[in-house]
Image: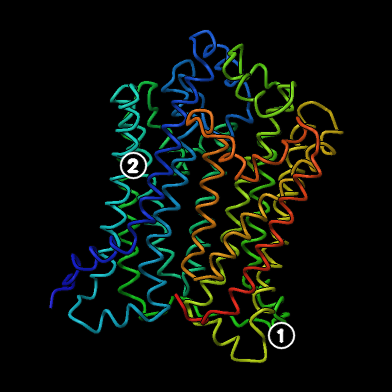
Amino acid sequence: MSRFVGTCTLLVSFLRRDRWMLLGWIGANVAVYWSQAVGTKAIYPTQADLDRAAASMESNPAFIALAGPTRALDTIGGQVAWQSSVTGAVLAALMSMFLVTRHTRAEEESGRDELVRSSVVGRDATVAATILLVLLANGVLAASITGSLVGYGLSWTGCFALGASAGLCGLVFGAVALVSAQVVRSARAANGLTGAVIGIAYVLRAIGDVGPGALTWVSPIGWSQAVRAFAGERWWPLALLALTATALTVGAVALLHRRDYAGAPWPVRPGPARGGLHTDLGLVWRLQRASVIGWSVGLFVGGVSYGSVGDGVEDLLGDSETSRDIFLATGGGDLVDSFYGVAVVMLAMITCGFTVTSVLRMRGEEVAGHAEMVLATAVPRARWAAAHLTITAVGTVAGLLLAGLGLGLGYAAVTADSAAVFRFVPAAAQQLLSVLLVGAIAWVGYAWRSRSGVLGWVAVAFCFVVLMFAGVLQLPGWVQDLSPFHRLPMLPAEAFDLGEAVLVGASTVLLVVVGHVLMNRRDITNQ
């Protein structure tokens, strides 16, 4: 029997299983690029506005570390490439990572892959179908980015360079994930190892762009930006990305052939004798501590990045009346405070990523059968769920407060205004109410029917649309008021509203209670 028998059948199965996930990842990434084109044109409607913005951005090391080298910023295409390429590369990398681990190591862990292999399926069919899936996903992503920007009116050459660099960067990190899946024993560890590589690549690129340029060439993200979309394209970095992805894939397949099924090159390290695992909260903390720490550090760094803009917001936005209206419409009359009010909300929405993921960790435990084993003991269902929700709340509070602290410290470092910390941390603390409400929506969805936990992501997407596109889409006021981020005032630009805070907080408590009632009424294995 051929080693690849059943590859096409598995690929079709993977596509059917992942169709909504792929649509979400690709749609979100395309939206990043397209919205930057639309937003840049709205904020900088004239060439003079673009020239002033370019002058202020080119001389700011914090901007360069955050987004990459500044090239052709006096053009719409250059702005899109600069503002979107890092985000697009990271999103493509994460999409590829989750696709690979989902269909390789996670399937081995659950035992499903062993059942598949017991039928007429070749030895390498699973990995071949996974590689084809990642190729197809990143190819569609590259074509969609290119098409959306060409449709907006940007040059075809620059659009193709931007789309191809994002897609090939996704392939490189997909290959990294394939290697990781061969050297560790769990999908969680494979994701953690690949995520660490993505983070290191980002940091090396940032350091290299600001300081020693050689470090940029150690990072695949740096290679993708070296294509220089809309700034005199050069194509050989695309070949470097393709060759690296190919070499890593070949290496991963070689490792697959050398290891035992469901095994790894290194033995499992024994855990501590107790390590706090004798309590519900200790167990959940052990499961989620890496996620809590990782998100908290990332949010702090994000806050510092936003804060490093300092009080140069007016120089950044130029004289564009449109851009001023966008920010002043969200807050009071001070442009700097309004800008940071929006920054706090953006950091809060990023925090929602941790909150929803943490809540839905219960679904992962349930699907894997771990929840059933825990609940077969003397642990009641309510206490098990409460432990997960407690860690979610603790992680959310830590992450968002650190984001506010980073925002204040970044601002203070640039402006020498040490009192900024006392303005931005309370602003972040208020948005905890909004983030926890989104988490409560995810909890109710999961408690009702485990697959319905996706309602949490729907809530995040809705809040993002209201924040960014309410004016463009001309959403009615009552629709906007459904978003807690819209209802709460944007500190420090607006005054605190106790009534709205109580309303959002009470809604969260009510949803948590409803979730516990629903959880107690359904079977734990109800998918």
Screen quadrant of the N terminus:
bottom left
Answer with the quarter of the image where residue 3 lies: bottom left
What residue is drawn where x is 60% and y is 79%? 520
Answer with the quarter of the image where residue 378 lies: bottom right
Residue 526 to residue 46: above or below: below
Q: Looking at the image, which is closer to me, 522 or 183?
A: 522
| First of labels 2, 1 by sequence position | 2
Answer with the quarter of the image where residue 527 lies: bottom left
> Disc 2 and disc 1: Cα gap in Å?
50 Å
* Residue found at the far left of this picture: 1
Q: Position of residue 236 (x, y in %)?
A: 31, 34
| Marker disc for residue 317 | none
Mark 1, secondary structure of its residue:
loop
**From the viewer's perspective, is 253 left or right of 374?**
left
What residue is drawn where x is 57% and y is 12%? 52
| Marker disc for residue 240 | 2
**From the viewer's perspective, is 499 left or right of 150?**
right
Which residue matches tag 1?
278
Name the kind of residue labelled 1 in the image. His
Q: Position of residue 355 (x, y in %)?
A: 62, 58
Name the kind of residue labelled 2 in the image. Leu
